[in-house]
Image (cartoon, rainbow, N blue to C red):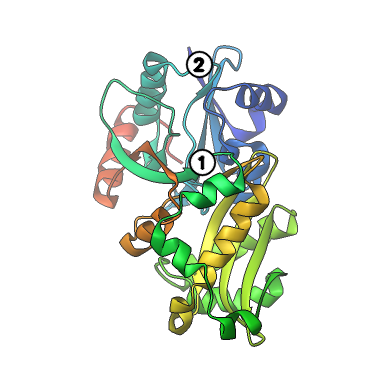
Amino acid sequence: MIKHLRYHEIDFVKYTRCLDTSEQFKYSASKTFLELAAAKKWDLLVYGDYDAVMPVPYSKKYGLKVVHHPKLCQQLGVFSLKDDSKLNDEFLHFLRTNFLVWYYAFNERNKFSSVLEKRTNFIIYPDSYENVRQKYSPKRKRKLRLDESVKADSELKNINFDEVSGFIQKNMIGHQNNKDLKVFLDTFKRFYDAGLLRFSAFILRNEIINLLALYEDSSATVLLGTFNKPETVKLAGSSVLIDKAIENCIEHKIFDFEGSDLPNIKEFFQGFRPVERTYQCIRNSKKDVIKNAFNLLLKGKSIF
């Protein structure tokens, strides 16, 4: 039987034990990550005595409690000792019949009897750096051979948040408005202040022209943001930064690109020859969310 627990009701010792021993382990479901990304705005669905768990983040929209992933959190879903499509179906049904779902993404290992919308992520699994680099596309290898004039006047450097926030504001793509951008910046700062995010910059003639936001824990290095000064993109500073990040971690950790819906970024990531992994999600329009709100209210469900 699946139970719905509010944040304050969660036994985090049991939750962490279930997550750490799960077949589907994902860094973004950890208590530490979710605390930084979603604060305390997430509930938990639990099967049995934490035999399987499913974190459910939410935000308040027009006074309604709407399920939606927080910024920087790509995948969640069901976590259990062995992935079980029948059990996953039960969690999916519970989610759909008890919550207002705007967007929810399961993890790449979750399988279902029905077909959901699919999205793509890119991962490089641990190997020697030499083997990984050998697989790069010919174009990516060429991009890593910097012109001598650029090499002589450039450096790679870790930069603190205060030094990069202005650069991110000027060069971030994909955000919808200034409010959306502020949420991203605030989230980056929380991760940075917690010591889990570093900003790696390509500096040319004492000016930042490319920047990576990299989340790091014991199992993964994750690319949470790529920012480029548009007029210097052809200098390939981002390629150099990503290659260096891969070199620093890949013998012991996965490197997770976090995918992208933007065709040019997707093509760029594919040049490093990562493994493509699909994950499934539920996505509803604003109209559908409002319609579902009326249906849940008629059934006596709490949506506030």
Numbered tag placed on residue 45 in the rendering = none
x, y percentage for residue 279? Answer: 38, 37
> Label 2 crowding class (10 Å Cα cut-off): few <14, some 14-19, many 20+?
some
Nearer to me, 64 or 145? 145
| Residue 132 visible, this angle | yes
Residue 219, percent across and down?
Answer: 65, 38
Q: Calculate the distance from the C-alpha at mark 1 to the C-alpha at mark 2.
A: 23 Å
Which residue is at 54% across, 72% downward?
237
Asked whether residue 257 appears in the rendered view, the answer is no
Q: Give the left or right position of residue 20, taking residue 122 as reference.
A: right
- Of residue 165 and residue 247, the one placed in the foreground of this image is 247
As shown in the figure, which amino acid type bears the numbered disc 1?
Answer: Pro
Residue type at tag 2: Lys
Secondary structure at badge 2 equals: loop
Name the residue at 29% across, 51% down.
286
Secondary element at tag 1: strand
**Left of 220 or right of it: where is 260?**
left
- Mark 1: give few (<14), some (14-19) or many (20+) Cα within 10 Å: many
Where in the figure is residue 26, as x and y percent of width and height?
56, 35
Q: In the figure, 222 relative to 201: above or below?
A: above
Report the number of numbered marks: 2
Disc nearer the start of the sequence (1/2) = 1
Q: Which mark is residue 57?
A: 1
Nearer the observer, 92 or 29: 29
Q: Nearer the viewer, mark 1 or mark 2?
A: 2
148 or 126: nearer the viewer? 148
Reading the image, the residue beneath label 2 is 82
Residue 240 lies, with reference to residue 133, above or below; the image says below
The location of residue 50, given as percent across then percent down, is 60, 17
Q: Is residue 57 above or below residue 167?
A: above
> What residue lies at 47% left-to-right and 69% top-to-bottom?
143
